[in-house]
Amino acid sequence: MSKKELRIGLVGYGFMGRTHSNAYKRVGDFFPDLQYRPVLKAVSARNAERLEAFAKQWGYESFETDWRKMVQRTDIDAIDICTPNDKHAEIAIAAAEAGKMVLCEKPLARTVAEAQPMVDAVEKAGVANTVWYNYRRIPAVTLAKQLIDAGKLGKIFHYRANFLQDWTISPELPQGGEGLWRLDDNAAGSGVTGDLLAHCIDTAMWLNGGIKDVSAVTETFIKERVHTASGKKQKVGIDDACIFHCHFDNGSLGLFESTRYARGHKALYTFEINGQHASIKWNLHDLNRLEYFDHRDDSLERGWRSIHVTDGDMPYMDKWWVPGLSVGYEHSFVHQMADFLQSLEENKPCSPTFREAQETQKVCEAVLASAASKSWKETGTSWPG
Ligand code: SOE
């Protein structure tokens, strides 16, 4: 069977540019039955020298220093946005208007208002779209979804999640510019809420349904940092840490925490869900395992089971090695790409679509508004979008 080409134009070559490029390169080798084959057609960024080196290293056929040119090219089918958050909307809307499929790194945008025209643009153009909330596609997390959907947990009472990092503790760290735009409110939109809690919220709604209302507290521990653009100390506008609790639509309670000030934790994403019959927990540092406790087990044998999610009948695992051998962070992106290609074959949306990611955006915005006003906020979400 001859494959259909999906000609990719990537915007941005940072950390996420690499994770996505790796996914495009690997997916055909490990998901050989897919009809579509990604072709690394072009990459775009402003620094020509580094762009050329990136294109060469990852095997892109060409490069453009102006993303607008790339979006207009007729030899490109899909635009993948890996830029800082403040560029997502402009690029996505231009790409959709040019009839391109659009893949966007999370979060969809800085605010709900900025994201809405993105949702409208892809829907008006009728182009395939997805947002890279990659953690859903870690096999153990996907297995959690299967267990919940099969009713194993029964009625769910509690959802708890953390995303802990420690890379911004030094007051000497500047804000703005390459690598550090995540500290600049204007480029990022928010701090840990949009960067890290957005992941937790996406997974949480996917596993446990919509979030009705939230009560949050945020903190900015370092109030001023040198801005790389001005060379001067400027007020820091992002949230360094955020804690919120919430009601889910199904009546369960949620508790979420994220910080970049948890010394010793580099990227510890964890969640635990407690249901009437069973509980599950997962953590990113041991990502191949899903912990499961079932109260219906024989009482003398009852206890937490540690399921090593590597067997061939477990999500995605028939595509990789042999049972018992594990996968890693990068595979979550390969899986998302495989699902995207599959969705094209089936002419179905690839979740999370822009519309679904907009619901996560609404929760993030309600969290920030709640912290600012010290009051409960309705999220106004309608999951799944
Ligand atoms: C921030 O350090 C970051 O790179 C996020 O931007 C990613 O989305 C997250 O997956 C890992 O941490």
Image: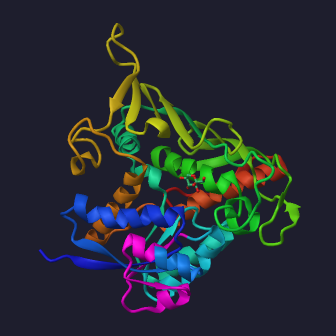
The residue sitting at the left extreme is 1
The residue lying toward the viewer, choosing from 8 and 257, is: 8
Picture layout, residue 93 above or below residue 315: below
Rendered-image quarter of ligand 1: bottom right
Q: Which residue is painted at 56% across and 47% down in the image? A: 200
Of 99 and 358, which appears nearest the observer?
99
The x, y position of residue 180, in whole percent, is 68, 61
- Is residue 14 positioned above or below 40 on the image? above
Residue 379: tell me if it is visible.
Answer: no
Question: Residue at coordinates 21% horizontally, 71% vertically from top-left?
Answer: 35
Residue 160 in picture, x, y percent from top left = 57, 35
Which residue sits at x=47%, y=29%?
A: 275
Query: Taking 103 as reference, is 305 left or right?
Result: left
Task: Judge whether residue 128 can be spotted in this image.
Answer: yes
Viewer-nearest residue: 101 or 319: 319
The magenta segment: 54-82
Pick the front one: 177 or 277 = 177
Residue 81 colored magenta?
yes
Is 58 covered by the magenta stretch? yes
Is residue 311 left or right of 151 when viewed as pictured? left
Q: Is residue 307 left or right of residue 126?
A: left
Locate the N terminus by quadrant.
bottom left
- Residue appearing at x 31%, y 68% in the figure: 341
Q: How many marks?
A: 0
Q: Where residue 172 sits: x, y (%)?
A: 80, 52
Quadrant of residue 369 within the rendered picture: bottom right
When the figure is inspected, residue 75 is found, relative to residue 38, above or below; the finding is: below
Q: Kindly indicate the quadrant of the structure image that contains residue 345.
A: bottom left
